[in-house]
Image (cartoon, rainbow, N blue to C red):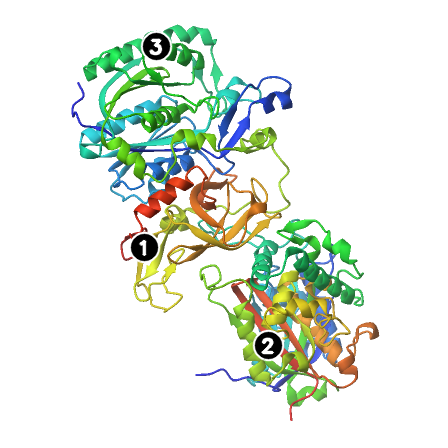
Amino acid sequence: MTAIPDVGVTGYGVHLPLWRLDRAQIRKALGSGGGKGTRAVASYDEDSTSMGVEAARRALAGASDPRSLVFATATPAYTDKTNATAVHAALGLERGVSAYDFTGAARSGAGALSAAADSAAAGRPSLAVLSDIRTGLPGSAEERDGGDAAAAVLFGTGDAVLARLAGRGSASAEFLERWRPQGEQSSRLWEERFAEGIYKELADEAVDAALKDAGLDRAAIDRVAVAGLHRRAVKSVTRALGKDATVVDDLAGVIGATGTAQPGVLLASALDEAGPDETVLLLVLGDGADAFVFRTTDALAAWREQRPYAPVAEQAAEGAEVTYQTFLTWRGFLRREPPRRPDPDRPAAPPSARNGHWKYGLTGSRCEECGTRHLPAIRVCRQCHSVDRMAREQVSDLTATVATFQADLLTYSLNPPLTAAVLDFDGGGRAVLEVTDADVAQLAIGDRLEMTFRRLYTTGDGIHNYFWKARPARSADAPYQAKSRTAEAGTEHARTAGEEN
Amino acid sequence: MATHGIRDKVAIVGMGCTPFREHWDKSAEDLLVDAAHAALASAGMRLPDVDAYWLGTMGSGYSGQLLSRALKIDYKPVTRVENFCASGSESFRNACYAVASGAIDVAMATGVEKLKDSGYSGLVRADIPGDGTTVPLTAPAAFGMLAPAYMKAHGLDEATLKDVLTRIAWKNHYNGARNELAQFRSEVPMDVIRNSPRVAGMLGIHDCSGVSDGSAAAIIVRAEDAHRYTDKPIYVKALSMVAGPGDGPMDPGFDFTTIKEVRRSAEAAYREAQVADPRAEFALAEVHDCFTPTELLLMEDLGFSARGTGWRDVMGGVFDLAGELPVNPDGGLKSFGHPIGASGLRMLYECWLQLRQEAPAERQIASITRGERKLGLTQNLGGRPGDCVSFVSVVGSEPSM
């Protein structure tokens, strides 16, 4: 039995990268492989950590901060070093909030959801961030079927619960279906038919256990969502479970199978569409099976009405095409001639730590004497010259206006030309940031841009340089953001904390 | 407290300047030897006559020993200064003040840069360890930011501004074609400039200054001693150097259509030299045309054109060699080349030649020949728009009454 009956989802958010690869392009280039539809492609400046931050920002919009954070990915940016701490820093969470990685296998996504629910049940609201970049060797099924995405699910208790976790069931088993040798970018697979039967058996066990835990039977299931990288098993299990329930569209034909992130993306899709008092079954296949039974509450519809972001399906429908050769370049399968310029600077650990509030949190300062905002924080006010009279101010959720800009065709960039804009933030302050996910030929003075957390580049010795960039707001999100702004008009948007900088 | 000028207290009595080139066969030391000995010869001096030295370089060597080792200076003070692209001007300024103070009789200011050994395109400098949050914009992109801002502020379309920028580059190449020391010594047709490969925004390779190696040097003495060395000393009327607080990238009030540091340094220099109408009084202006939009803005910031009208004056030929106020008659950074630490002194070298009527006939300035104008200006900038240092000097061929 689930220990605390009112634990459940109190918020969720999904980040789908802007870019889509048309699978037909693969066959065009290679003469074989490929297929129908598109897949989501993380940009050259995204990784599992940066995408996780974007999803988490969406899940936390309007919510209070969690007490713990778990970050799951099969494609961690770092091993040995925790990635969840970068997510923690980018969200501007307090130090007292714990942050742990669940990395290695796609199954960690289900594990992170479970762990976050347990933490919430123990009185510590918890955010599970699930993120993945799926790829394979050029021409492989993995390359074709995979997709890049991140999802974040906030667990808590009480009236804020949108979907109560009514029951859970797991079935774990050791069998060799998929594995990735250390240091390699793509997985190896055993003959697909071998694991199909095993998964069907494990799925039944997990689903039965979860329903028993919830005190429900199969007939009670209104919606069913099945996640997993074993596409054949997912199909047959979905067929069996979907006979008398609505099957949640996994959007695999548009975004691909998003691995570690997929359970979160599917849960979000299900909750985007569910009415009150529905039973939602989320089943995750991968080295076993994990089933979650949720019961939606009355709070769900009102929460959806207020959130400033588009539902998953609308996000999926908005995509910009990336060519196959660009996709290969971004994923490192095609090494291109670099400019005759030095490699970019290696971010040094001490200044990165000293300036962590800026580098990770996009937090500047506001002068307490004259009210001038500085980005990044400085000690001497540029306006009134007061010394050390500053309060911190996070600007990552603010919109900024382009004062001027320039495309740099000469400098080192993973995706030339590097484009920089001088940005004037709403409420004061100016900063110079790179622009991403934009058609730079269309950029103009006066354009309004929002902030996004990115991996700028990786140095020769493997240091990932994370920082914020600016991008045009997604058109899918725009109407929801406008609605949300109207709702909270008049309230101070910027978060402030502490006197020191 | 106030700043007091040193108007007419010191004078230049000798100068030297190497050709600015891709000097594959010369080191920074070799270039310094060439420039310093040319300056000594022009003043009729020997090395032991010089009491103290200044050396401006951004990154071609460390400490005064770059110069003392090269020249084999006999245990005298050598001060190495760095102020980005204004390092050569900083060297000159400090040498002038040392002489004006009375502490020494003869000073030599030198500047050098050896850029072509790096193997990279454009400028490269070693940055101090940072947090990785500064956008790694190259110089053409940083100055290219001026272009969309200027268009927006003054209602120009891109084609018009491109014509203006093209004409600036064309004019500087025209002048450089008449200068044996310049890196690029041929005229370049407008369509070649206009269609050159893009490097940043609307800027092509022909909107950028030349990357080259070179060195220049000047010898400074008290004004009353100047005639011991030459009949035609060049008097220092004003020296102004300002370092900005770096507001541009932080202040939403800064609109990238002006460079405050330039305006402030010009105002101070004009005050010190008692220049009331710069466009009418200067015989020539050697300005920091690192990129074509920079030269356009400088025409307004130095008071040669009213705000928003510099582009009309450029198109009208006001700043041509035969125009009302010739700007960069030696070809400027664009055509003469831009070895960082040497450039500030190179600008003074053109004032030295022109005001003494020693420039080659094909680029002699008519107002000087006719005896109408006797003042020259140099303006040297280091850093980026809104985040820079700026230097302005005024020099003249006659002491004030």
Numbered badge on residue A43:
none
Q: Is residue A427 above or below residue A113?
A: below
| Residue B208 in sight | no
- Pick the front one: A121 or A487: A487
Instruction: Tell me the quadrant of the picture where the C terminus of chain B can be found.
Output: bottom right
Instruction: Tell me the quadrant of the picture where the N terminus of chain B can be found.
Output: bottom left
| Residue carrying label 3 | A243
Confirm whether circles 1 and 2 share one chain. no
| Percent x, y of residue B351 | 71, 76
Quadrant of the rendered structure where residue A11 is?
Answer: top left
Viewed as shown, does residue A44 lie left or right of A229? right
Under mark 1, the amino acid is: Arg
| Residue carrying label 2 | B95
| Residue carrying label 1 | A392
How far apart are labels 3 and 2 at the CA level?
91 Å
Under mark 3, the amino acid is: Lys
Q: Is residue B225 above or below residue A352?
A: below
Viewed as shown, does residue A142 lie left or right of A361? right
Confirm whether circles 3 and 2 share one chain. no
How far apart are labels 1 and 2 at the CA level?
45 Å
Chain of the residue under the numbered disc 1 shown in the image: A
- Pick the front one: A98 or A25: A25
Viewed as shown, does residue A130 lie left or right of A25? left
